[in-house]
Image: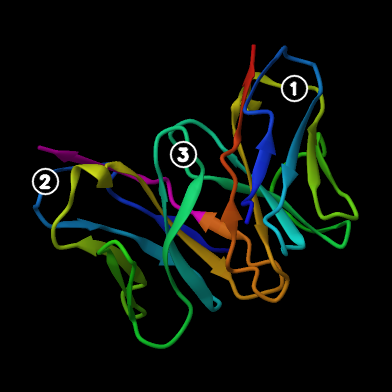
Amino acid sequence: AQSVTQLDSQVPVFEEAPVELRCNYSSSVSVYLFWYVQYPNQGLQLLLKYLSGSTLVESINGFEAEFNKSQTSFHLRKPSVHISDTAEYFCAVSVVDSSYKLIFGSGTRLLVRP
Amino acid sequence: DAGVTQSPTHLIKTRGQQVTLRCSPKSGHDTVSWYQQALGQGPQFIFQYYEEEERQRGNFPDRFSGHQFPNYSSELNVNALLLGDSALYLCASSLTGENYEQYFGPGTRLTVT
């Protein structure tokens, strides 16, 4: 079975400061890795994904995540956050099979303060 | 290009009742997955439909059932509602062969009283 752990339920940070949201996963088979963002009263939006290749993946709005196989981690980072980044962030894995069902962590609330 | 749409937006039901939620996938997608997101938690996979059949199912009781229509839209039915069924129900669509790329709808907020 697969599982995802997001140790930090909430991360408060000041605007323009760097941030790291931690994600660790457990799986005995190959998985793909994802970060989704959820703004209040909205659905999930894909932020970035790791399928294969370079272990560092980037999003269009300045976030990046690095796949570390030995530590089974996929931490999300941003060098300088904005107020608009305030949201719930979910790390997820999907098993490489026909359905690619997503298994989510419990989420981390990023709270950016002015 | 319309994204994933879900209806209704909000729903209030009484314990023991039955509910039907609806989802229209993103244009060009043929696979629909349903997730339940309880308050303060991450979404949990309920099941996935492809070619009008349930392809895979998560750890949910038989009270949860679904259907996919020839136009790829889908319904989620929940019978004998319990208070614990109160949650945000998310629909995600994808294209077979690229099911790792799932696009989510805004969700239906179900409250069971």
Determine which quarter of the picture holds residue B111. top right
Question: Residue B18's x, y, as percent?
Answer: 81, 23
Question: Residue B15's x, y, as percent?
Answer: 73, 14
Magenta residues (range): A104-114
Structural crowding at the residue carrying mark 1, measured as other residues with C-alpha within 10 Å and reported as few (<14), some (14–19) or many (≥20): many
Task: Output the chain of dot 3.
Answer: B
Residue that numbered label 1 is attached to = B81
Q: Say which quadrant the N terminus of chain A sits in.
A: bottom right
Residue that numbered label 2 is attached to = A15
Picture disc at residue B14 = none
User: Looking at the picture, do discs 2 and 3 lie on one chain?
Assistant: no
Name the residue type under label 1.
Leu
Task: Output the chain of dot 2.
Answer: A
Whether A89 is among the magenta residues is no
Locate residue B93 relative to residue A2 in the image: left or right. Answer: right
Whether residue A77 is visible to the viewer of this picture, yes or no, is yes
Q: What's the CA distance linking mark 1 and mark 2?
A: 43 Å
Tell which circle, 3 or 1, labels the residue nearer the N-terminal end: 3
Q: Say which quadrant the C terminus of chain A sits in.
A: top left
Name the residue type under label 3.
Gln
Kindly identify the residue that appears in the image at 46 percent across and 32 percent down.
A41
Helix, strand or loop at mark 3: loop
Task: Output the chain of dot 1.
Answer: B
Determine which quarter of the picture holds residue A12. top left
Structural crowding at the residue carrying mark 2, measured as other residues with C-alpha within 10 Å and reported as few (<14), some (14–19) or many (≥20): some
Q: Give yes or no for contact between labels 1 and 2 (Cβ–Cβ under 8 Å).
A: no
Helix, strand or loop at mark 2: loop
Q: What's the CA distance linking mark 2 and mark 3?
A: 26 Å
Q: What's the CA distance linking mark 3 and mark 1?
A: 20 Å
Helix, strand or loop at mark 1: loop
